[in-house]
Image (cartoon, rainbow, N blue to C red):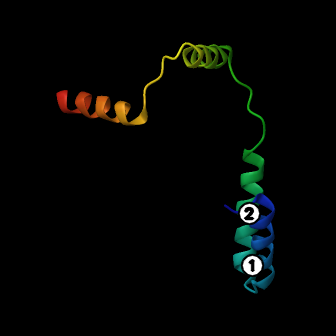
Amino acid sequence: MATVDNIRNGLIDKILSIKNKDFLVALDKIITSSSSESETVELTNEQKIMLEMSEQDIKDGKLISQEAMNKRNLEWLNSI
């Protein structure tokens, strides 16, 4: 698996080889918009409570595998 530094350096190398100005402008817009989306989001009290409940479920062992959940969902969908 590539490290973050390896990925970043590979992208830099690829960007340096691009000569198309329109492509670079579009890439700049994508990078700029994605970095602004990564700002911290403030959770509501309800969201915090749900996360705390989830953490407690994990501690209490109230878990279900993805496979079991998929099966349960298929059974539910077939019953509709």
Can residue 80 be seen here? The reply is: no
Residue 75's place in the image compared with 50, above or below, is below
How many numbered marks are there? 2
Please name the residue shown 73% across and 63% down the image: 29
Using the image, tell me which numbered label, if any, was put on residue 58.
none
Kind of residue indicated by mark 1 = Lys
Mark closer to the chain start, 1 or 2: 1
> Left of 41 or right of it: where is 52?
left
Q: Quadrant of the C terminus?
A: top left
Relative to 36, is 64 above or below?
above
- Place residue 2 in its image quadrant: bottom right
Q: Is residue 67 left or right of residue 20?
A: left
Residue 58, position as x, y percentages in the image: 57, 19
In percent of the image, x 72 and y 46: which residue is there? 37
Disc 2 secondary structure class: helix
Given the image, on which type of amino acid does mark 2 rest?
Answer: Lys
**Residue beneath disc 2:** 29
Mark seen at residue 14: 1
Helix, strand or loop for disc 1: helix
Residue 45, position as x, y percentages in the image: 68, 14
